Amino acid sequence: MQQDKGLKHISPVAIDDKLKHWKQVEYGRFFFLKNKNMNILLTIIPSILSGILAYIFTRKKYIADVKKANAEVEANEIENVDKVAKIWRQLSEDITARLTGDIEQLRQENKHIRDRLTLITRENNALSAQMASLQKELRVTKIENEKLIQQLKAFNVHFNGGAAVEQGAQKKVKTNQSIR
């Protein structure tokens, strides 16, 4: 209310004095009051508004560009992962093929070695049996030789009378034993 009282005391001349630096400007159907300070505001406000609008639209564009760049990066990453997977797949197929060939070759070599081992084992068993037979035959032959030597000694003792023949027989036995 006090403001209303203050306005009642202002004379129309005082209002005219205050508005004398204002100009009335007609714009279409509207009339505007204009002064120097208002000119500054009228130049600053549109600049600020255009800056704010530019920020908003630029930000939207920046966000859209960032999303687009992120989508491209993801697409590139997926493409790179696919390329790496393809390389690994090809390497694993090459290694698998090479190792399969190596394994087959090793299996053939192993079979050949087993066959040779079987033959050698059979031959070894046959030779062991032959050796056992020969050792048995040697023992039997030794026993027969001892018997023959005993018979010769007895024969020599009866026919030659003795000692000279017995010494010759002993030399012969020693010689036979050293040969074995």
Image (cartoon, rainbow, N blue to C red):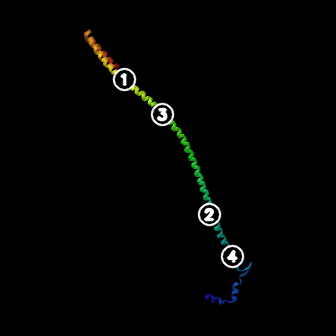
Q: Position of residue 87 (x, y in %)?
A: 58, 47
Q: Tell me whether circle 3 and circle 1 mark residues in contact (CB < 8 Å).
A: no
**Depth check: 130 or 152 in front?**
130
Mark 1 neighbour class, 10 Å CA radius: few under 14, some 14 to 19, many 20 or more: few
Dot 2 or dot 1: first in sequence order is 2
The three-letter code of the residue at mark 2 reads Ile
How many numbered discs sit on the rendered protein?
Answer: 4
Q: Which residue is mark 4?
A: 42
Determine the CA span between mark 2 and mark 4: 31 Å
Disc 3 residue crowd, few under 14, some 14–19, many 20+, Cα 10 Å: few
Name the side, left or right, on which 101 lies relative to 149: right
The front one of 71 and 173 is 71
Q: Is residue 130 above or below residue 47?
A: above
Mark in front: 2 vs 1: 1
x 36%, y 23%: residue? 133
Dot label at residue 111: 3
Nearer to us of marks 4 and 3 is 3
For disc 1, the marked residue is 133
* Residue type, mark 3 in image: Lys
Residue 49: give x, y in percent of width and height: 66, 72
Q: Quadrant of the C terminus?
A: top left
Residue at x 33%, y 17% (from the top left corner)? 176
Q: Amino acid at mark 1?
A: Ser
Which residue matches tag 2?
A: 63
CA gap, disc 4 and disc 1? 131 Å
Q: Secondary structure at mark 3?
A: helix
C-beta proximity under 8 Å, tags 2 and 1: no
Q: Mark 2 or mark 4: which comes first in sequence? A: 4
